[in-house]
Amino acid sequence: MSRCLFELILAIKRKCLCNEEQIEVDLGLSAAEFHGLMALDNGQGMLGGQFAERMGLSPSRGSRVLNKLVTDGLVQVESRATDRRSILVSLTPKGARMKDRITEQMRDCEQRICGRLDSTHVDRVKGVLEWLEAAL
C-alpha cells in the first residue's frame, strides 16, 4: 500500500534529523547552536530580532541561544549607533570556521544522496522540494 505524502515527509524528516544530529555530535554543538549558526551568513550581520525570527523562536529564546553562541566565541554582538536598543549579530572568525565545517558535512550528506541519482533526477527532486517548502 502506498504511503500518503505526509507519511513520506515524516520519514524523510526523521532521516534528515539523524544526519543533522550526527553533524551536531561530530562538531560538539547543541541543536540550538547548530540552528543559530545556520541562521547567520558568513560576512554579513543581522539584527537580533531577525536572528530569532529566522530561527523561528521567540525573542527571549533567541536571546538565550545568542548568549550561548557569544559565550562560546562563535558570534559577536554590537550595539547599533543609530539605535542602542537593537544589536547587530555576526559570526566571529571561529564561528565562520564552524559554519564552514557544518556546510562541508552537509555537502557530504548531499553527495551521498545525489550519488544515487542522475542529474535530471537531482534537479527534479530539488524542484519538488522547493515547491513543497513554499506550499507549507
Image (cartoon, rainbow, N blue to C red):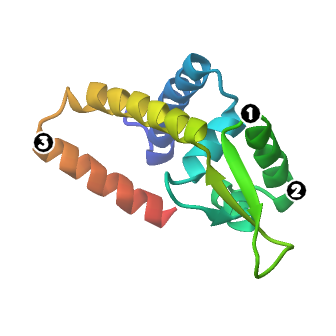
Q: Give the mark nearest the N terminus, 2 or 1.
A: 2
Residue placed at 20% from the left, 27% from the top?
A: 115
Eye-nearest disc, 2 or 1: 1
| Residue at mark 1 to residue at mark 3: CA–CA distance | 40 Å
Question: What residue sits 51% from the left and 54% below the top?
Answer: 41
| Residue name at image x 27 percent, y 47 percent | 125
Q: Residues within 10 Å of mark 1 (few under 14, many from 20)?
A: few
Question: Is there CB contact under 8 Å for labels 2 and 1?
Answer: no
Question: Image quadrant of residue 113?
Answer: top left
Where is residue 75 shown, x and y percent of the image? 67, 46
Give the residue furthest to the front: 81
**Helix, strand or loop for disc 3:** helix
Residue 4 relative to residue 54: left or right:
left
Mark whose residue sits in front, 3 or 2: 2
Mark 2: few/some/many CA within 10 Å (<14, 14-19, 20+): few
- Counting from the top left corner in percent of width and height, residue 85 is at 86, 73
Residue at image mark 2: 60
Query: Can you identify the residue that label 1 sits on?
Result: 72
Comes first in the chain, label 1 or label 3: 1
Label 1 sits on a secondary structure element that is loop
* Mark drawn on residue 83: none
Residue that numbered label 3 is attached to: 119
Quadrant hosting residue 1: top left
Say which of 83 and 103 sits in front: 83
Which amino acid, mark 3?
Ser
> Is disc 3 in contact with disc 2, using a CB cutoff of under 8 Å?
no
Q: Residue at x 37, y 58 (%)?
A: 130
